[in-house]
Amino acid sequence: AQSVTQPDIHITVSEGASLELRCNYSYGATPYLFWYVQSPGQGLQLLLKYFSGDTLVQGIKGFEAEFKRSQSSFNLRKPSVHWSDAAEYFCAVGDYGGTSYGKLTFGQGTILTVHP
Amino acid sequence: DGGITQSPKYLFRKEGQNVTLSCEQNLNHDAMYWYRQDPGQGLRLIYYSQIVNDFQKGDIAEGYSVSREKKESFPLTVTSAQKNPTAFYLCASSPGQLYGYTFGSGTRLTVV
């Protein structure tokens, strides 16, 4: 079965600093990978996704992620963090085999705090 | 605008009562999903459905039930058999494989 690990439960950065959130996955075939963001008490919003092709993918709000098959990683990055980026971030891997019909397995999330 | 509506946003119930959470989408998506979110545990899949009148158990289906009588609707019932029902419940939908999900804004259920 597929799984996702986000090693950092909580990350704090200063506004304007760069950001990298780590994600490691386990999946038997070519993975379909996603990053979502969640503000407190809200649903999740899709930031970006990777299916195939270029291993560096661009998303909304200035985020990007790089797929590294050799490391089973899909880390999320942003060159300069804004206070509004404070939220919880989830990495997910899609299961597209058989009757799974694209169900996603999520990591445990990383809470991002931004200091002014 | 198209989207997913979950209602109510907050729900309080006494222990031992069944409660039904509503999820409606007007995106014409085939697949719908229910997840449970607890602090520090990420999202865990309860049930999912690909088409009307068909659904499958997820990883934590015990104590929950669903129906899919219409494409737009996928209600979740939390039964009295669910040992620890207090949580944040998220509904999502997808047009198919490779698209990822669109999420509703969630229902916070508190059982007292």
Image (cartoon, rainbow, N blue to C red):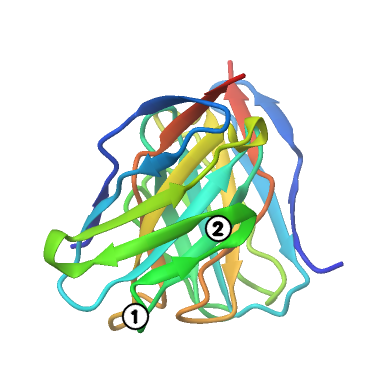
| Front residue of B18 and B42 | B42
Label 1 secondary element:
loop
| Amino acid at the residue labelled 2 | Leu
The residue that label 1 is drawn on is A99
| Front residue of A63 and B22 | A63
Image location (x, y in percent) of residue A21:
37, 42
In the image, residue B97 above or below residue A18: below
Label 2 secondary element:
strand
Is residue A44 left or right of B82 when viewed as pictured?
right
Q: Mark 2 falls within which chain? A: A
Is residue A97 left or right of A101 when viewed as pictured?
left
**Residue visible at 51% across and 63% down?**
A48
Is residue A32 left or right of A73 when viewed as pictured?
right
**Residue visible at 38% across and 43% down?**
A20
Quarter containing the C terminus of chain A: top right
User: Residue A47 shows which numbered tag?
Assistant: 2
Image location (x, y in percent) of residue A49:
46, 68
Give the spatial CA distance, label 2 vs label 1.
26 Å
Image location (x, y in percent) of residue A26:
18, 60
